[in-house]
Image: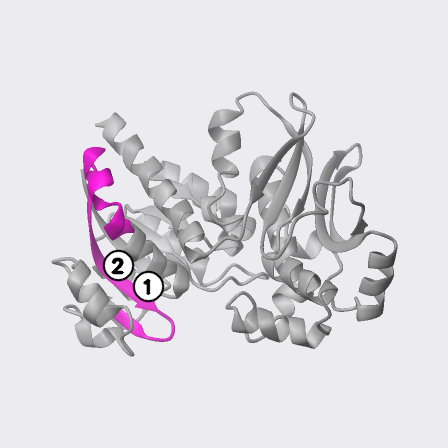
Amino acid sequence: MHYKLALVGFGNVGKALVELLFRKEEELRAEGITFSIVAIASGAHGRCILPSGLTPQNYFEHVRDAESLNAFTQVYTSSTLDLIEKCEADVLFENSPVNYHTGQPAIDHLRAALNQGMHAITANKGPVVHAYRELTQLAAKHHRRFLFESTVMDGAPIVSLFRGALPGARLLGFKAILNSTTNLILSLMEQGKSFDEAVLYSQQAGLAETDPSGDIDGWDAAVKIAALATVLMDTPTLPDQIDRTGIRGITPQNIADAKAQGMRYKLICTAERTVSGLQAKVAPHLVEPGSPFYTVEGSTSIIEFHTDTLTKLTLIENDPTPFTTAYGLLADFITAARGDILRY
């Protein structure tokens, strides 16, 4: 089957996705899947619709580093929503910046795509915590899929693990390091950098935003906890409901004292079913050498699941890149396409 693809969000992940799609084109064709990229929208660089499809040569020579996408468009659009309505795509990849508090405008983009009959795929955590049930039900109404494997731990198969590989397993709780930036900052502070130096290094490495508060104040970790609780534990949860403490208050002296005791600070995410409901928290913890969390360095992430069938199941993702996140988006696309092929 042939799919017309549209991208909303054209930063590092969006560009990595385009390059991964081109690299995997022959493998996808072997599965009966072909594609053309017909629309791209970027908050900083404008929008373009290309009904004939983007070629690899045109992408690498002109579009990838273009100051403005508007110069390439063959159809005028007044907004991102207008682009979604006009592009006639079959799949939307929504990768705009996350809004922890409302999930917008990503929710509107995904809703519009589903109403246009597109599969809706995202790496954006906001829509999962703020509109998971609405978008899932809307997708079912239109016989499409709302998929979001890349929202937590980049391309690691967390959601699909519980949807496919662990039938009948009930998730009772989890413990994790889910924010790469804070883990890198803490590792750098152990090497002697000040907090501000470690944050600056993380920004220069492309992990931390210009405003790093979403990471260092625990918001990114909290929204990931909320997403996992909402989807895997069937407990709708918002970031504001998470007991949240970031790493802003950790000093070089705290780090030195921990090292003297043979321990390390890590920003730990936890969620647990209790008789009184879900208990969820993100906060710095001192970790002992015997813990699997102790050896997690730099931007690596780890999650330890506790289920009613498997006492502990641990998944580690080492040093992710934008291509890691892009792979999760590609995997969701293949999942949606396989469903279509089987249906028809």
| Side of 166 relative to 238 (left or right) | left
Q: Quadrant of residue 232?
A: top right
Residue 90 located left or right of residue 289: left
- Residue 151 appears in the figure: yes
Identify the secondary structure beneath mark 2: helix
- Tell me, for residue 81, which label it has, or none: 1
Q: Is residue 185 above or below residue 325?
A: below
User: Residue, x 81% and y 46% (percent of image)?
Assistant: 288
Name the side, left or right, on which 1 lies relative to 321. left
In magenta stretch: residue 34: yes
64 vs 111, nearest the viewer: 64
**Residue 37, picture quadrant:** bottom left
Q: Is residue 236 visible?
A: no
Q: Position of residue 164 (x, y in %)?
A: 47, 27
Is 264 or 103 nearer to us in this picture?
264
In the displayed structure, would residue 130 be above or below residue 141?
Answer: below
Disc marking residue 325: none
State the residue position of label 2: 85
Give the extent of the magenta segment: 21-47
CA distance separating discs 2 and 1: 6 Å
Q: Position of residue 300 (x, y in %)?
A: 58, 51
Category of crowding for the residue at label 2, using alpha-carbon neighbours closer than 10 angstroms: few (below 14), some (14–19), many (at least 20): some
Percent x, y for residue 334?
32, 38
Three-letter amino acid code of the residue under disc 1: Leu
Q: Residue at x 44, y 52 (%)?
A: 325
Q: Residue at 25% of width from left, 47% of height from top?
A: 90
Tell whether label 1 touches label 2 (CB within 8 Å). yes
Residue at the far bottom: name it.
67
Q: Using a 10 Å C-alpha cutoff, classify the residue at mark 1 as few (fewer than 14 neighbours), some (14 to 19) or many (20 or more).
A: some
Q: Quadrant of the C terminus?
A: top left
Instruction: Tell me the SS state at disc 1.
Output: helix
